[in-house]
Image (cartoon, grey):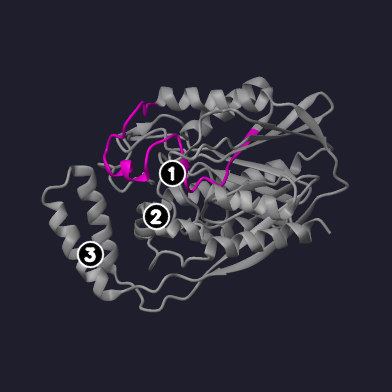
Amino acid sequence: MSGYAGRAGPSLGVHQPTSVRALVIDDVAIVALDVCAVHARTSEQITAAVRSWVRTCVVTATHTHAGPCVAFGRVGGHDARVHEALVVAAIRAVEEAASSRRPCEGRLARGYGAEVARNRRHPDRAIDPPVWRLTLRAGDLVIADLVSYPCHPVVLDASNRLIAADYPGALRAAMEQAHPGSVCVFLTGAAGDVNTGDPAEASYAESGPGDRTPSAADRIGRHLAAVALAAEEEPVRADGVRCVRRQVLLPFARPDAAERAAQVRSWRAQQRTAEAGLARVLQAWIDWAIAGVPDDPAPWTGHITALDLGVPIVFLPGEPFLETAAQIEASVGERVLIAGYADDVPGYLPPSGEYAHGGYEVLDAHRYYAMPAPFAPGCAERVAGAAVETVTAARH
């Protein structure tokens, strides 16, 4: 299972089957997988296979921490058999969606006051991100709902050993119950620093604080669906769908071999008295260091995709913070639906101001992501700038 280095072992069963969903709008496919992270190899394999049906394909992860390991060694091991099954399912989903396209009317809604998302790095900072809903109708029949919310799907903690979608699973089920015959595709927003209230370091233990049960995930998912359904709709006026994809290069901070050696000694010392979950996290960090880190790693290359169908939808790689989403909206000058975890997830993208605060997302997460170092300060701003340029290009 993927998402918690402190988890005691592999899955013991299935609470919710791993879901693969596709929505095709015009010649653009949006694919959502119930996994913690997608790798560029996965996105490229799916995209290459669906080119006869669509021009552009974006592959996203819901970022559930109760899904299988399929990211080629990032955020856990890699199960090639499960990965292949997911790829096959994604290709079939796109083919089925593309072959059943029909003229639709779009209705957009943004619901506030969910009171679910919390800034896990700065609990004193109140946030109220909207629950987005884009409903596509053919006459009176709802064909699909695209729902997005920026909150880590980590209601289930490391003690959970059952495969599950976390709260997005219950959200989708509630939406499809409200609109019989429809398909709900969920996109996790800019949730790098957002969850239901626990610090990221709480995941080092097998059991986190609070109610971290399947019933809690179900309750939260259904509540978010209710907020989405109650939000006031407005028509989406589009004279066609335009899509633009741009490349972005992100440098890493320079690794320090001497510091890394000292850290390994410290981690081994901590393991002697650490609780079981933390001891496993420390071992993952030690394994990362022993595997070797290049002295001067090449920049990471990713992509940003903007889809304009009357409202801009932007797909960002990695784990962007909520501040980055706000920066993009402010620069564009209008509302923008921003999804993270798209096409490649190499780790967190903290805004420059967050580096002074340290913490898991800034200092530690790159090891679990099998990256050579954290991304350098300024990378989040580079992503935001490229996103604004991509939206602008898609709108003209």
Rendered image: mark on residue 357: 2
Q: Residue at x 33, y 33 (%)?
A: 160
* Vertical placement of residue 333 versus 232, above or below: below
x then y, percent, for residue 334 = 75, 47
Report the residue marked by disc 3. Answer: 263
Q: Residue at x 68, y 46 (%)?
A: 95
316 vs 377, nearest the viewer: 377
Q: Kindly identify the amino acid type of the residue bearing the numbered disc 2.
A: His
Image quadrant for the C terminus? bottom right
267 vs 22, nearest the viewer: 267
Secondary structure under badge 1? loop
Rendered image: mark on residue 122: 1
Query: Between tags 1 and 3, which lies in front?
Result: 1
395 vs 56, nearest the viewer: 395
Q: Kindly identify the amino acid type of the residue bearing the numbered disc 1.
A: His
Is residue 187 rendered magenta in the image?
Answer: yes
- Earlier in the chain: of badge 1 and badge 2, it is 1
Q: Tell how many labels.
A: 3
Which residue reaches farthest right?
239
Q: Residue at x 38, y 67 (%)?
A: 373
> Mark 2 and mark 3: span between their CA atoms?
19 Å
> Mark 1 and mark 3: span between their CA atoms?
26 Å
Classify 10 Å Cα crowding around label 3: few (below 14), some (14-19), many (20 and above): some
Is residue 254 rendered magenta in the image?
Answer: no
Rendered image: mark on residue 320: none
* Vertical placement of residue 308 versus 128, above or below: below
- Earlier in the chain: of badge 1 and badge 3, it is 1
Magenta segment range?
A: 184-213
Q: Could you tell me what secondary structure mostly forms the magenta stretch?
A: loop
